Amino acid sequence: MLFELMAPFYDWFIRVANVDHSRRMPEWLAPVEGMEVLDLGGGTGVNARTLAGAGARVTVVDASRAMLDRAAAKKVPARLIKSDAANLPLPDESFDIVLISDAWHHFRDHAGVVREVARVLRPGGRLYIIDFDLQKRKTRFLALLEKLVAEPSTFTAPDNLVEMLRQAGIKGDFRYLTANQFIYKGVKG
């Protein structure tokens, strides 16, 4: 519900909130040229536009029709699919890269999302998750705000995320981008 309402001004909001990392995505995910990239929870296509501009073939999957409609209105050069992240209508081993940016904590079924990511990622494929660490004060404030607007969020501690993904055959680690935001980088074995 929140994202249906936020869609018209989401791009502005992420810039103001200083969580728009789209300009850095090609660097962080390099190499991307010629790669099949799944932007899971990709919303209005902010990251998809940048990655496509760097030569990636991008598919955006999001649960919000309004967010995808906004991406279409902006003519984001990507395939846009409305779907639950835990039940992807995509073939096995079809992506070189999966990106989940500022969306992980919005997914209700983390185990299902991990299963689906492991299924659609090719062997040797890379997974990137950018999210917030609830152990940090700023993130606790964000969680409270989201709760106040009836947006249930489930944050995962970075160490727990690393272990959850390792058990699914994706090995990686994380580093902090900001005081409360981290990036996980993993490779499917």
Image (cartoon, helix red, strand yellow):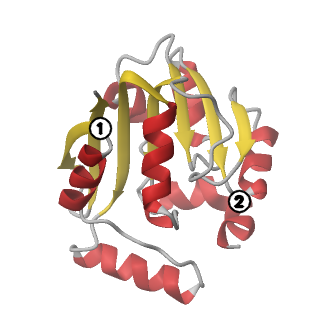
81 displayed left or right of 119: right
Question: Residue 15: horizontal and vertical position, in percent?
Answer: 50, 54
At 68% from the left and 28% from the top, the residue drawn is 78
At 73% from the left and 70% from the top, the residue drawn is 5
Q: Earlier in the sequence, mark 1 or mark 2?
A: 2
User: To which residue does mark 2 refer?
Assistant: 7
- The quadrant of the picture occupied by the N terminus is bottom right
Instruction: Give the amino acid type for the residue marked by disc 1 in the picture.
Output: Gly
Question: Residue 170: horizontal and vertical position, in percent?
Answer: 29, 37
Counting labels gives 2
Up/down of 114 relative to 80, above or below? below
- Which of the pair 156/55 is nearer the observer? 156
Helix, strand or loop at mark 2: helix
**Residue 103, can we see it?**
no
User: To which residue does mark 1 refer?
Assistant: 169
| Badge nearest the viewer, 1 or 2 | 1
Instruction: Give the amino acid type for the residue marked by disc 2 in the picture.
Output: Ala
Q: Quadrant of residue 56?
A: top right
43 displayed left or right of 176: right
Question: Residue 158: horizontal and vertical position, in percent?
Answer: 23, 58
Up/down of 59 relative to 176, above or below? above
Up/down of 38 relative to 57, above or below? below
- Which of the pair 146/120 is nearer the observer? 120
At 64% from the left and 54% from the top, the residue drawn is 84
Q: Quadrant of residue 61?
A: top right
